[in-house]
Amino acid sequence: MKWSEVGSLSCSVARTASVIGDRWTILILRNAFLRIRRFEDFQSNLGITRHLLAGRLKRLVDEGILTRTPYQESPPRYEYRLTSKGRQLYPVLISMAAWGDAFMDEGKGPPVLYRHEPCGHTVTPQLSCPDCGKAVHAHEITPLPGPGLVLADAVGRRKKRA
Amino acid sequence: MKWSEVGSLSCSVARTASVIGDRWTILILRNAFLRIRRFEDFQSNLGITRHLLAGRLKRLVDEGILTRTPYQESPPRYEYRLTSKGRQLYPVLISMAAWGDAFMDEGKGPPVLYRHEPCGHTVTPQLSCPDCGKAVHAHEITPLPGPGLVLADAVGRRKKRA
DNA sequence: CGATCCGCGTTCCTTTCGGGAACCCACGCC
DNA sequence: GGCGTGGGTTCCCGAAAGGAACGCGGATCG
């Protein structure tokens, strides 16, 4: 199975993973959220090869996650900024950071803290139910088939021998 | 730069990405959250080669994200289940699903819906501030240096020419 | 009691992709 | 006009992914 096919699966996670599910892309986005915007800065910051960086940025621009806009002309220079679509990946990145802080922490505490400006507190954002407002845990969520389901997908499939 | 080095960076996202930041691993975890537990089921469901699946599962077990426990003896058969550490990756996966639903949806609506059992509503879990309880958006969060910061990392670094 | 199947891998081979470093080029500057 | 700089592209090589076959213990069937 090729990745081009996986991207077309009836699974939002798979579709998302086909866009951002690689290590460099995740790190590029992390830096984008930290307001890194230029090719050289991404490159020196991540240590990624220019070659790969060029490819990843292009991909992200094609996907509408970053824009490539000139910040000066003569010589033409560009910067890469998150689009609205890109900014909405923030929960994914923050969740990864929170998990990393909780489990990969090496005993030194988190390298970065997050301040929620509206309330001024330093916090770890958490998942909550927009309806009842309570924190959400994995075991409290039941996945149900939705309108966009096409393939026999995942749940309750055990080959033909039913 | 090798991935073994990136994993040691002073960045929780990088450390997390070094563990789950690859497409197959993400999909394996997605299936694990959908209560897929056996080698054969992961394999037929994902279309991943047995070879790669074996490697990914091993990695996840080594990282303490899955456990490999016998569900019968004679013949010995094992199943892979999320540990507590693994279950806490749920926000990452749910956020990816939510993003995929919002942007990659192909006009058919989401393939899966999520019901929050405590309140009974079908919802898209969102990120909120555990302190003030309000939904959190990227532009409202300011990253600050934390106690575990070691390298000159990311923010405000522009090579030596300051 | 041999033949077959099932669950769970492992081996082998080929193709693709990432790492590292050099090269390119338009411009701006002294 | 030689040098620096931002933003890439090219080249080669070793590492990883894809595909498919093979192995193997135990159960099951006839």
Image (cartoon, coloured by chain):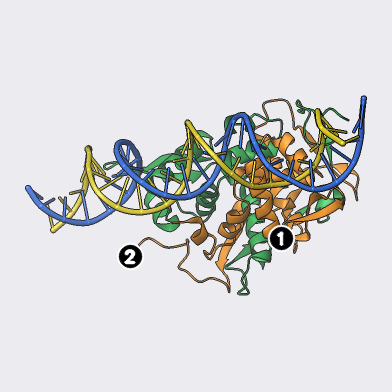
Chain colours: A green, B orange, C yellow, D blue
Q: Quadrant of the C terminus of chain A?
A: top right
Q: Amino acid at mark 2?
A: Lys
In the image, residue B90 above or below residue B4: above
Q: Residue at x 74, y 29 (%)?
A: B109
Judging depth in this view, the residue of B29 and B100 nearest the camera is B29
Q: Which residue carries the number 1 mark?
A: B64
* Residue A143 x/y as whole percent: 83, 40
Q: Which residue carries the number 2 mark?
A: B160
Q: Secondary structure at mark 1?
A: loop
Q: Amino acid at mark 1?
A: Gly
* Residue A49 x/y as whole percent: 40, 49
Q: Is residue B47 left or right of residue B125?
A: left
Q: Are marks 1 and 2 in contact (CB under 8 Å)?
A: no
In the image, residue D18 above or below residue A112: above
Cα–Cα gap, marks 1 and 2: 40 Å
Q: Residue at x 42, y 56 (%)?
A: A47
Hey, which quadrant is residue B41 in on the image? top right
